[in-house]
Image (spheres, coloured by chain):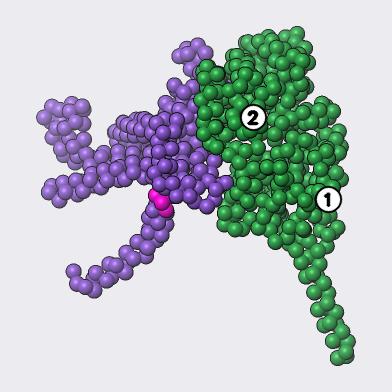
Chain colours: A green, B purple
């Protein structure tokens, strides 16, 4: 009896020790919640799968609403309580890297065989700071696709394909404006959606926000031309452009009074659920040029303070795997193979979307991005208010260059 | 007062003073200290910059906008809110029928959260879908819809209007309480002497409630200068900085761009303005107390 009791206690102790060692690393993973898509259930299933494949690692997920996510991360980093892994908006990566908050993943990626060609190039580039990889692309989307109301186009006798050029978009917007109807859903409030849409017109015209040496390029001819084009196009947009957002334009598009709205591909589920007869084209560029969009999306980063760098890397490898990535994102998987499958299943025009994603540029990879974007917002509001574009761009550039 | 009494006074005051010091005055001192440092997310270690941060903020493109916007916002709201509040209180003091219901209805804007008020009015001002433009076009006030919040010339007035709509019941309540305490016999005597409504207001009512008016004005000055949510929800300080006031600028600089040193500098300027207003409040209160003692 004594022996069997001893055996029982020993077995329990061994199994308890085994249970402890089975999950002797617990990773803290923070993610933001942008939509109410029910994603968390799929994400939890994937994490369960990861833990089954990696019994020595447990993962605790904290989901934080988008509006407070950046502040919570910042507070955690400054307070020394950063998670092991978090999703970082592409535009934050440079600042987090500059602050020394996130780890250099170059060697780990190289050892694992993760490389740029497995991901959308612009998304991969958004994680590279001073030549070092500080994150792995997790999900992406691109601003902007031009979604059009096919019935309004038919009634006006306008070919939807024509809006893929600067000239065609202007002509279509003019033809589609009148009698309480608006041709094009331009918006110019102080928000990041304003920045990315104007950027895409600048990129498509061959311009840039920052030159390769980091100096401001907004007052160079391609950018100024693109902004002047948008200033002219604004007369076919709904009134109130300076306080209007992409959300405002969505309301008008859905009630049938707006012919063209600018959104990323994530707009498709909303349109699919509506009564609008819609279609889309990939952005807009001058005749003979390819539309270049502006990337949005999130990267997975490991915090420098994490004591479980290797386990965290295994988790990242798992999350961007082609058979997993599509299950755990609410935008488009950053892994190109996963993206193809995801788009084929969930979006109209998957090939067009893949093309536009492959042509997109990231926003400026500056550790002062938030300040650069703030200056851009002021500039774009000046442009939409009818200011002299070159003078406004010169002033913006002097402010941006003064940041360095 | 005995020594024991003094000990008891300090015993009761002590915890409150300690908490005030910890949660109000220490952060205030911290803000002043931060304003001399360059601190941002990419430079988390504060670097002493002395007055350079102030120079940068004062020379910046937006400081003048924020300063003058704050002045026009505060004066606009306070003046209109107090006039409307006094007018409403005078009406409600006339013993009209359904007075209880009327008071409850008038109080409604005041009890709405600022964020809800901002969202509601933002939608009402919408150039395409908003009720205001529809009504104005219907009644022939304007021919075409106006973008009230998107035009730098009208945005501040539009936001002030909403703040007055939300805030006037607060002033009204205070004025109503004061009006109900005006000596009826003095009003009746003035009426018997042939004074009309206007003379009674100027010569009897206003002198009787003078202290309340002053306190109300100074209090609304302080509350309005500190206001944040309606402006942020309706315009985020735009268009083109036309509605940026100190609280919205501090929030955007600190929590939007993580330039904590500059945000603290805006905060210090804001504290200095508030200190003047608080001093004004204290002077008004002391004057009122003195008059009460000599009355």
**Residue A5: image location, x then y, percent:** 85, 86
* A373 is higher (above) or lower (below) than B33: above
Task: State the residue at coordinates (64%, 12%).
Answer: A177
Visible in this render: residue B21?
Answer: yes
> For numbered disc 1, what is the local secondary structure?
helix
- Residue at mark 2 to residue at mark 1: CA–CA distance: 32 Å
* Residue at position x 37%, y 41% in the image: B269
Task: Check disc 2 and report the residue beneath it.
Answer: A211
Q: Which residues are magenta?
A: B30-34
Q: Is A51 drawn above or below residue B214 in the view shown?
A: below
Mark nearer the N terminus (2 vs 1): 1
**Residue A301: where, in percent of width, then height?**
71, 49
The x and y percentages for residue B180 are 26, 41
Inspect the magenta stretch and tell me whether residue B32 lies in it: yes
The foreground one among A301 and A59 is A301
Asked where in the image residue A189 lies, by quadrant, the reply is top right
Q: Quadrant of residue B178?
A: top left
Q: Chain of mark 1?
A: A
Q: Looking at the picture, tell me which residue is in the foreground, B123 or B13.
A: B13
- In the displayed structure, B272 sits above or below A272; it is below
A243 drawn magenta: no
Tag 2 and tag 1, C-beta contact below 8 Å: no
Left-right relation of A192 to A55: left
Q: Which mark is residue A112?
A: 1
The residue positioned 38% from the left and 33% from the top of the image is: B67
């Amino acid at each position: 009896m004594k022996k069997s009791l001893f055996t029982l206690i020993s077995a329990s102790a061994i199994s308890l020790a085994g249970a402890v060692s089975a999950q002797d690393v617990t990773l803290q993973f923070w993610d933001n919640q942008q939509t109410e898509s029910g994603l968390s259930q799929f994400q939890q299933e994937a994490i369960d799968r990861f833990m089954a494949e990696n019994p020595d690692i447990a993962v605790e997920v904290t989901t934080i609403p988008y509006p407070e996510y950046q502040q919570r991360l910042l507070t955690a980093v400054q307070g020394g309580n950063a998670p092991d892994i978090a999703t970082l908006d592409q535009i934050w990566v440079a600042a987090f890297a500059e602050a020394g908050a996130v780890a250099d993943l170059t060697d780990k990626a190289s050892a694992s065989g993760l490389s740029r060609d497995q991901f959308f190039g612009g998304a991969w580039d958004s994680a590279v700071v001073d030549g070092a990889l500080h994150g792995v692309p997790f999900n992406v989307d691109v601003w902007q696709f031009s979604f059009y109301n096919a019935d309004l186009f038919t009634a006006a006798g306008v070919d939807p394909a024509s809006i893929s050029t600067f000239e065609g978009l202007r002509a279509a917007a003019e033809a589609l404006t009148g009698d309480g109807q608006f041709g094009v859903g331009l918006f110019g409030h102080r928000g990041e959606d304003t920045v990315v849409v104007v950027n895409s017109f600048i990129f498509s015209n061959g311009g840039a926000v920052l030159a390769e040496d980091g100096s401001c390029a907004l007052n160079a001819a391609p950018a100024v031309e693109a902004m002047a084009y948008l200033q002219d196009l604004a007369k076919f947009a709904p009134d109130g452009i300076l306080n209007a957002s992409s959300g405002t334009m969505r309301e008008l598009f859905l009630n049938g009074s707006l012919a063209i709205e600018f959104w990323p591909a994530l707009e498709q589920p909303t349109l699919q659920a509506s009564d609008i007869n819609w279609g889309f084209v990939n952005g807009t560029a001058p005749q003979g040029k390819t539309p270049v969009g502006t990337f949005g999306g999130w990267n997975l980063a490991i915090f420098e303070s994490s004591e479980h760098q290797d386990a965290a890397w295994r988790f990242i490898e798992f999350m961007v795997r082609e058979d997993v990535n599509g299950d755990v994102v609410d935008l488009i998987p950053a892994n190109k193979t996963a993206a193809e499958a995801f788009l084929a299943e969930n979006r109209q025009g998957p090939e067009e979307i893949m093309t536009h994603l492959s042509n997109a540029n990231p926003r400026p990879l500056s550790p002062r991005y938030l300040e650069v974007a703030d200056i851009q917002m002021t500039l774009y509001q000046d442009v939409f208010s009818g200011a002299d574009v070159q003078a406004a761009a010169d002033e913006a550039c002097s402010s941006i260059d003064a940041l360095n | 007062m005995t020594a024991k009494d003094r000990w008891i006074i300090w015993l009761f005051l002590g915890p409150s003073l300690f908490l005030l010091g910890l949660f109000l005055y220490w952060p205030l001192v911290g803000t002043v200290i931060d304003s001399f440092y360059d601190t941002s997310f990419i430079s988390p270690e504060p670097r002493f910059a002395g007055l350079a941060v102030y120079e940068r903020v004062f020379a910046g493109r937006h400081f003048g906008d924020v300063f003058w916007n704050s002045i026009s916002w505060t004066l606009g709201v306070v003046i209109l809110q107090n006039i409307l509040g006094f007018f409403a209180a005078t009406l409600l003091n006339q013993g009209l029928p359904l007075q209880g219901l009327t008071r409850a209805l008038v109080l409604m804007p005041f009890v709405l959260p600022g964020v809800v008020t901002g969202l509601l009015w933002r939608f009402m001002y919408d150039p395409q879908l908003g009720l205001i433009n529809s009504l104005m076009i219907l009644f022939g006030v304007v021919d075409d819809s106006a973008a009230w919040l998107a035009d730098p010339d009208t945005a501040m007035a539009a936001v002030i209007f909403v703040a007055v709509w939300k805030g006037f019941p607060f002033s009204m309540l205070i004025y109503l309480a004061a009006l109900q305490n005006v000596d009826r016999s003095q009003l009746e005597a003035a009426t018997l002497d042939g004074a009309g409504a206007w003379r009674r207001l100027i010569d009897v009512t206003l002198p009787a409630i003078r202290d309340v008016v002053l306190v109300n004005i100074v209090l609304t000055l302080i509350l309005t200068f500190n206001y944040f949510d309606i402006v942020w929800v309706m315009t985020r300080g735009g268009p083109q900085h036309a509605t940026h006031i100190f609280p919205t600028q501090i929030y955007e600089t600190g929590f939007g761009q993580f330039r904590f040193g500059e945000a603290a500098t805006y905060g210090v300027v804001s504290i200095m303005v508030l200190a003047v207003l608080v001093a004004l409040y204290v002077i008004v209160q002391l004057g009122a107390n003195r008059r009460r003692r000599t009355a």
